[in-house]
């Protein structure tokens, strides 16, 4: 391999590696966010189940 070819292959490999790492980070972030949203909604539904019966009552 010539020096120029080696350099271009190194740059392509580095760019591909960086792209794969960025993709992996975005995917993991999405999975973590989905889990956090699911947990947040479960807590909200639990709290609303306690609040909802009081919400519809009229003050006496």
Image: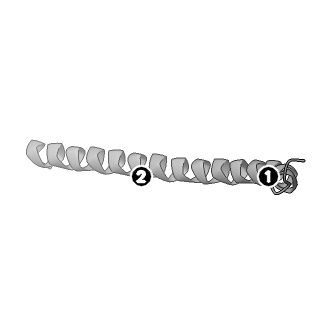
* Element assignment for label 2: helix
Marks 1, 2: nearer the viewer: 1
Rendering coords of residue 43 (x, y %):
77, 48
Rendering coords of residue 17 (x, y %):
35, 47
Rendering coords of residue 8 (x, y %):
15, 47
Mark 1 is surrounded, within 10 Å at the Cα level, by few (under 14), some (14 to 19) or many (20 or more) other residues, namely: few
Residue lying at 86% horizontally and 55% vertically, measured from the top left: 57
Mark 2 is surrounded, within 10 Å at the Cα level, by few (under 14), some (14 to 19) or many (20 or more) other residues, namely: few
Disc 1, disc 2: CB below 8 Å?
no
* Element assignment for label 1: helix
Q: Which is nearer the eye, 10 or 44?
A: 44
Count of numbered circles in the view: 2
Rendering coords of residue 23 (x, y %):
41, 52
* View extreme (front): residue: 60
Residue lying at 86% horizontally and 51% vertically, measured from the top left: 54
Drawn side of residue 34 relative to residue 40, left or right: left
Residue on which disc 2 sits? 23
The colour scheme used to paint the residues is: one colour
Residue lying at 79% horizontally and 52% vertically, measured from the top left: 48
The numbered disc on residue 27 is none
Q: Which is nearer the eye, 53 or 37?
A: 53
Instruction: Say which quarter of the image contains residue 38.
Output: bottom right
Drawn side of residue 32 relative to residue 52, left or right: left
Label 1 – label 2 distance at C-alpha: 37 Å
Residue lying at 87% horizontally and 56% vertically, measured from the top left: 53
Q: Which is nearer the eye, 7 or 43?
A: 43
Residue on which disc 1 sits? 48
Q: Which is nearer the eye, 58 or 7?
A: 58
- Of label 1 and label 2, which has the lower sequence position? 2
């Amino acid at each position: 391999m010539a020096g120029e070819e080696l350099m271009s292959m190194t740059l392509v490999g580095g760019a591909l590696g960086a792209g794969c790492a960025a993709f992996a980070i975005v995917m993991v972030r999405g999975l973590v966010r989905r889990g956090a949203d699911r947990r947040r909604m479960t807590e909200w539904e639990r709290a609303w189940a306690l609040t909802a019966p009081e919400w519809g009552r009229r003050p006496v």
